Structure formats: structure tokens, C-alpha cells
Amino acid sequence: VDLETFLDDARELLAIESTADHPDGLAAALEFVVGFTGGDFMTERFASGGKPSALLYHGAHHEHGQWRPRYGVILNAHLDVIPAPKDQFHLRRDDARLYARGAQDMKVSGLVMALVFRELAGQLPYALGLQLVTDEETGGYDGTRHQLELGVTTEFAILGESSGLGISTESKGIANVILRATGRSAHGAYPWLGDNAVLKLQRSLGRILDRYPVPDAEAWRTTVNVARVTSPNTAFNQVPATAEAWLDIRFPAGDPDLDGKTDAEVAAYLAGFCEPGVTAEVQRMDSPAHADVTSPAVTALQAAARRQGYHGGFLRKHGTGDSRFYRQHGMNAVSFGIGGAGQHGPDEYADITTIAPYYEALSDFLRTFRPGWGPG
Ligand SMILES: [Zn+2]
């Protein structure tokens, strides 16, 4: 890979303000990467909820009466970034670091994926897909999920989320829950005449946190963040009649109480911690990601990373990501990207020394991969 030429292209892509509040920026980033592949590929375009996405592959396939192939491998890149001050959209290079919004998460990895796709898609004994989406940072429902719901299938997917050439095999699921407490109002000087909703809520939260205490340090288990506690009461001398708390619950695959459960089941489970008069309502439920590491594809990817001098170890991400949609559809997916740090922060950077090894490892893996290797 000619690093300097590549970095010139990366500079252009990083300069596009492709945030959710700039729809034209999302479209521009997508068109930039589609154009970067050279335009010789089948390009299927999608749009959902105002979010454009694309799926590129080589040649026309007619398998099983469908024109869209079952892919051997899909490379998935999200081209949206979270908002940042204007100066973060001007790439700044400092020694081995490339500073910009999206440098680590994940425009640089995405552009490497597009480069590898451009070079190899026409030469492989299986269909290689390049899936470009623009809504990962806002949930991924209109990009990756949308495409999978329309029937895009693959044996194996690699998402370009930053991993320093490690292999991210798991990410946690999310349950956002609102607890609502109802009591009885009274004069604040006569609290025994009322039923304080804030106190009911507090006792219920206490029981939930007894079950899910905040860990002292990083731990691969279910956590509960109490994100907000409010009451509409505005007077010192009143016993509050209602109160509400927001819970951000993060859970790994295999949590027997939360993984694979419906909203109603999760609400009922949490209501079990609450006293009478406190109800639970699920606002958002997202499943965890969990790759099958017995898959020959995972072993081959690990070997490819090791041939570049990287450990290629398995990583777990506490945050969520688009790979969960593949698991939901019964497909195996991992994240594998360049190195860097400062994701979503003011000093986000890509580690330039990982770009060429990432390019080599990805190319090596795709040349090695054979149909049948995706599932475990
Ligand atoms: Zn990302």
C-alpha cells in the first residue's frame, strides 16, 4: 500500500462533516468511498429513515434465483461520525498519529476496507461485499439492520471498528428502562400523611443496585447506570406524588435475565425489584454481539494478524455496535480495525503504523478465506 497516496484520500474523507445533523455530509462521505472503489462494481443503494447506505460487489450473480449473492465475506464500514468542533475535520498529522474526528472511529479503517475491496473483489472464489452505512453512531437501524432485513446474507462479516488488529468478538446489549413511582401528595410538614414517590423509587433503585453494584473496575458483567432521577414536584413543603428514574443497563450475551428477552419480560423482571406503585417500562432494547470463535474464519483472521506481527487476540467491547445485527440474523461477525485512541473525544487519532499491517492482514485473510469457513 502506498501510504502517502492513501493518506491523501483519507484526508479528504476525514474533512467531510458526516454527522447525523448533516445529511448531505452523510451522502457525500458515502459517495466519496463508492467513488474511491473506482465505479466498476455492482452498487446496490439503500435508504431508510433518511440514511443512505450501499452494498458493493463484483459482477452479476444469479444464485438460487436471486440476483444478490450470498456473500462469503462482507466488509462493513460506517462513514458517519459524532459531532466535533470544525477544527477536528482538518486532519492533523503528528509523528505516527493522524488526528481527526473519525480517524479512529472509523473512516480510516473503512477506507482501507474499500481499498482492499477494490483490489481483490474481482479475484476471489467467493462473493466479497463492501457494506457502507451512515448511521452506526445513531443506532445502525437504518443501515446495517435495514440491509440485513432486506435479505443480505453472508457467511462472515468484518466490521472495521478500531481494534488495533485485535479481534472484537463480543459487545454488550442495551436495555434503557424508565422506572415510574406513584405515591400520594401531602403537606411537607406532615409527611406521614403522604406516600413519598421519590423514596419509593430510591428503595427500588437500591434493590436493583444491590443486584448490580457498580464495579470497582472493568468487569465483563451486567451493569446499571442510573442516568437520571426526577420528580415534577417544585415545592419544599410538598411530599412528591410521582418520580421517575432512567436506567441504562448494559449486559453481555448469555445474561439469563436479559439476553434474548422481550421488552415485556425485561420490564417484568425489573418490576420484581420494585415496591408496589413503581413500574418499569423498556424504552430501548438492543441485543449483545457474540461471535462464534470456533469458526475457521476467525482462526484465519487471527493468523493473518499474527503474520503482521500483531497478537490478534480476542477483545470485548462494553459499548454496542452494528455487529449485533449479524448475530440477530444468525450470521457470524467480528470487528477488526486499525489502532488508535481517543474515540469520540477531542484528541481522537489513528495510529498510522497500523494502517499498512491492517491492509496486509485484511488482504491476506480474504485471499485465504474459503466458502464454508464462516460459521463455527
Ligand atoms: Zn464506530
Image (cartoon, rainbow, N blue to C red):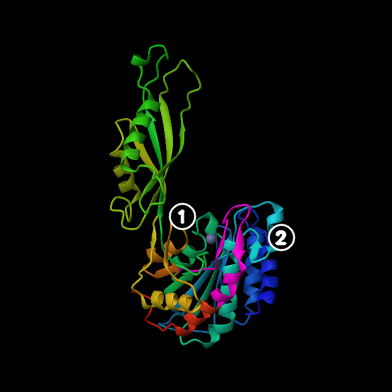
Residue at 54 percent of width and 56 percent of height: 137
Residue 154, can we see it? no
Is the N terminus in the top left, top right, bottom left or bottom right quadrant?
bottom right
Labels 2 & 1 near each other (Cβ < 8 A) = no
- In the rendered structure, which amino acid carries the disc numbered 1? Gly
Q: Disc 2 and disc 1: Cα gap in Å?
A: 27 Å
Residue 281, can we see it? yes
In the rendered image, residue 344, in percent from the top left (x then y), is placed at: 58, 54
Along the viewing direction, whichever of 148 and 211 lies nearer the viewer? 211
Q: Residues within 10 Å of mark 1 (few under 14, many from 20)?
A: few
Instruction: Determine whether, in the image, residue 342 is placed left or right of residue 264.
Output: right
Along the viewing direction, whichever of 110 and 328 lies nearer the viewer? 110
Is residue 249 depicted above or below 330 in this figure? Answer: above
- In the rendered structure, which amino acid carries the disc numbered 2? His
Q: Which mark is residue 90?
A: 2
On whether residue 343 falls in the magenta region, the answer is yes
Q: Which mark is residue 319?
A: 1
In the rendered image, residue 7, in percent from the top left (x then y), is placed at: 67, 71
Is the C terminus in the top left, top right, bottom left or bottom right quadrant?
bottom left
- The answer to which quarter of the image holds residue 183 is top left
Along the viewing direction, whichever of 218 and 134 lies nearer the viewer? 218
Residue at 59 percent of width and 60 percent of height: 80
Residue at 40 percent of width and 56 percent of height: 172
Instruction: Determine whether, in the image, residue 93 is placed left or right of residue 359.
Output: right
Q: Is mark 1 within 8 Å of ligand 1?
A: no
In the rendered image, residue 127, in percent from the top left (x then y), is placed at: 48, 82
- The answer to which quarter of the image holds residue 169 is bottom left
Q: Looking at this rendering, what residue extends furthest in the top direction?
A: 189
Residues rendered magenta in the picture: 335-359
In the rendered image, residue 92, in percent from the top left (x then y), is placed at: 70, 61
Disc 1 element: loop
